[in-house]
Amino acid sequence: MTSPVQRLVGKSTVLGDGMTITRTLPMARRRTVGAWCFLDHFGPIEVHADHGMRVGPHPHIGLQTVTWLLEGEILHRDSLGSVQVICPGQLNLMTSGRGISHSEESPATRSPRLHGAQFWIALPDHARHGEPAFVHHDTLPACQHQGLQVTVFIGELLGLVSPANVHSPLVGAELRAADATQTALPLRPDYEHGIQVLTGRLTVDGEVLEPGTLLVLDIGRDIVSVQAEAGSCAVLVGGAPLQEELLMWWNFVGRSKQELLAACTDWNAGAAYFGDVKNYDGERLSAPMPPW
């Protein structure tokens, strides 16, 4: 018996200095897919004539950020002193641990368009109070699979293993079709999975997907059929069902209202454990206080 599917239609919101993004996780109907708890799709947007992306210094706790680009470049700075430009096909993985801050902006020398996605992975309780970290991977495992170019940026798929270090059972991969193709992808039946189109159109088990919709496949599947139009690109995310109850507010992932309130208060008060982002030409963001 095929496990059920769930369509989540993304909502538009504004990130940083006015850049519109589409968010498909979290939603009221679905908070997580495995430990993936956040999925933003931005662009494609023209960035050659203005300042491009500008997201001032802001904090995180309890998560890892995954940045993935299809077009353009982003300059990452963080409170560990990291300064890194990411390009398409590369991975930026930042682990907040107990606390980190970072900024994101378009570099001065850049391509005319920016297009990509950013994900959050909720850290399990045993890892969420650890040391913050940042790693950049400029080479990731990839292969051709029945007409799809598959690049694995988190976990394992098709025998390819990402070098990225995560703290729960997960998979994250880009699926790209240069030409129209129909194929089947193996899945781990103990994982939940989600497929989101970033460009073009895919038909997944009969469900037509275009940008802005995330299709969630529940546990129990070991294969999924994929029909992709020429030029399509999608992301596949998945993982073991999360056994921990999460609470999220602004840029924080926690377990209690008190913890999230404390994080907002600490950031606005300049608490040292978030660190400082050096050499960002702009103001840091203020944390909106939760309503409780």
Image: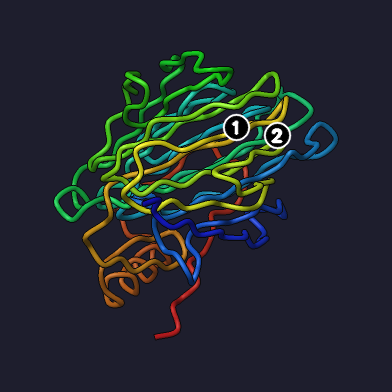
**Tag shown at residue 128:** none
In the displayed structure, 127 sits above or below 144; it is below
Residue at far right of view: 49
**Tag shown at residue 114:** 2
Residue at far bottom of view: 292
Residue at far front of view: 1
- x and y percent of residue 174 in the render? 52, 29
In the displayed structure, 36 sits above or below 6; it is above
* Residue found at x 56% / y 34%: 226
Q: Residues within 10 Å of mark 1 (few under 14, many from 20)?
A: many
- Which of the two residues, 130 or 253, is positioned nearer the viewer here? 253
The residue pinned by badge 1 equals: 74
* Residue found at x 46% / y 44%: 102
Question: Looking at numbered disc 2 in the image, what kind of residue is underneath it?
Answer: Leu
In the displayed structure, 31 sits above or below 52; it is below
Q: Residues within 10 Å of mark 2 (few under 14, many from 20)?
A: many
- x and y percent of residue 134 in the render? 35, 33
The answer to whether the residues at label 2 and label 1 have Cβ atoms under 8 Å apart is: yes
Question: Looking at numbered disc 1 in the image, what kind of residue is underneath it?
Answer: Ile
- Which of the two residues, 121 or 31, is positioned nearer the viewer here? 31
Q: Nearer the viewer, mark 2 or mark 1?
A: 2
Q: State the image quarter where residue 51 is shown.
A: top right
* Residue found at x 41% / y 16%: 141
| Helix, strand or loop for disc 2 | strand
- Which of the two residues, 13 or 272, is positioned nearer the viewer here? 13
- x and y percent of residue 63 in the render? 33, 50
* Upstream in sequence: badge 2 or badge 1: 1
Q: CA distance from mark 2 to mark 1?
A: 8 Å
